Amino acid sequence: MPSTSFPFLTPDFLRQYGGVGAERIRRDGIVSFRRQRPPALVAGGNAKGQSVADSAVSVGAATGSSTMRSGETTGGPGERSGHGDAARAVMRATDRAVLTTAQRDAAGWPYPSLVLVALDHDATPLLLISTLADHTLNIAADPRVGLLFDGTAGLEQPLAGARVSVLGHALRSEEPRHRARFLARHPSADIYVGFKDFAVYRVAVERAHLVAGFGRVRWLEAADLLLPPVPQALVDQEGAIVRHMNDDHADALQLYATALLGFPQRDGDGPGWTMTGVDPEGCDLRRGAEVARLPFGQRVAESGEVRAELVRLVRQARAGGGEGVTSAGHPAS
């Protein structure tokens, strides 16, 4: 039966998002839907029928922060960290976004375009765009931009899924790390990254708008969305960690993706899963056109802590303990 506290939880809705009973919703207000649909590979999701929304609305288990409750739109600083976790989960789970700029020759009308995106260690968005493109010409005239990260792919009711709109200023970056992280996330960009008209931009975040489903809406300031300064040790060691995992532990990467994240194994000689990046909250994986997010159980600061988490996750995968992990960035409730 529908919950009186959450009128959108109709019987049909609860059947579609099975696994969360009305009693639990009525008791503690937590909404964390696990989709019961045929396995499908979707951007930002996995093959268990879970999408980024599953973990984006059930936050904090990986970091000890607060849990988002349905309908919550206000709160103090102690509550906001959980919403930041949820928003970063959406952002880290996808490799593309809609970029909106002010059209310079059309009285500032919004101009949306599809872009590939990577994230810095603290979740600052990174773009590789051409100065010949309209959106880059618009940025030259007015650097204010919006980025929509969509975590609703594959859902029967997209408006029940999570999405994040990020507002900020697009600034050209000459930081080698930004270029390296973008190319690691998007290996195909190596074909054109050397062209003179292409450059890396970082989006200096001002605010973000998280919609984690029906009635779960929150504005976030930059300090609530982005991680605090990332330890330099982890930044410096990232390349070595990624190379070591790809060169010496490819079998573990396949295990993470299949046993923990629910992606099917591929037959034949197709590409396997590779690690493309590590940050304090988890690591990014890619197999061809597919991307996945493997969350850590706690934040890490250096290579020894990364190794401990990766060993723990291998043991969990071998023990068949994948039910507690989702590809969107947080353990499922």
Image (cartoon, grey):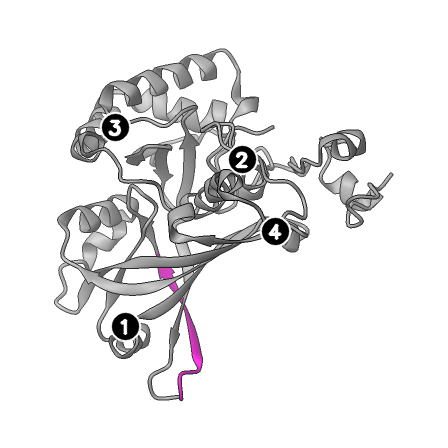
Q: Quadrant of the C terminus?
A: top right
Is tag 3's residue or tag 1's residue first in the polypeptide sequence?
Answer: 1
Q: Which residue is mark 1?
A: 136
Q: Which residue is mark 3?
A: 246
Mark 1 or 4: in front is: 4
Mark 3 or 2: in front is: 2
Q: Secondary structure at mark 2?
A: loop
Q: Secondary structure at mark 4?
A: loop
CB of mark 4 within 8 Å of CB of mark 2? no
Q: Amino acid at mark 2?
A: Val
* CA separation in Å, label 1 and label 4: 34 Å
Position of residue 51 measured from the top left corner of the image (x, y, whole percent): 56, 41
Badge 3 local density, few (<14 within 10 Å), some, or many (20+)? Answer: some
Q: Amino acid at mark 4?
A: Thr
Q: Secondary structure at mark 1?
A: helix
Badge 2 local density, few (<14 within 10 Å), some, or many (20+)? Answer: many
Position of residue 319 measured from the top left corner of the image (x, y, whole percent): 50, 11
* CA separation in Å, label 4 and label 3: 42 Å
Q: Is residue 61 magenta?
A: no
Q: Which residue is mark 2?
A: 59
- Left of 19 or right of it: where is 313? left
Question: What's the magenta region?
Answer: 107-116
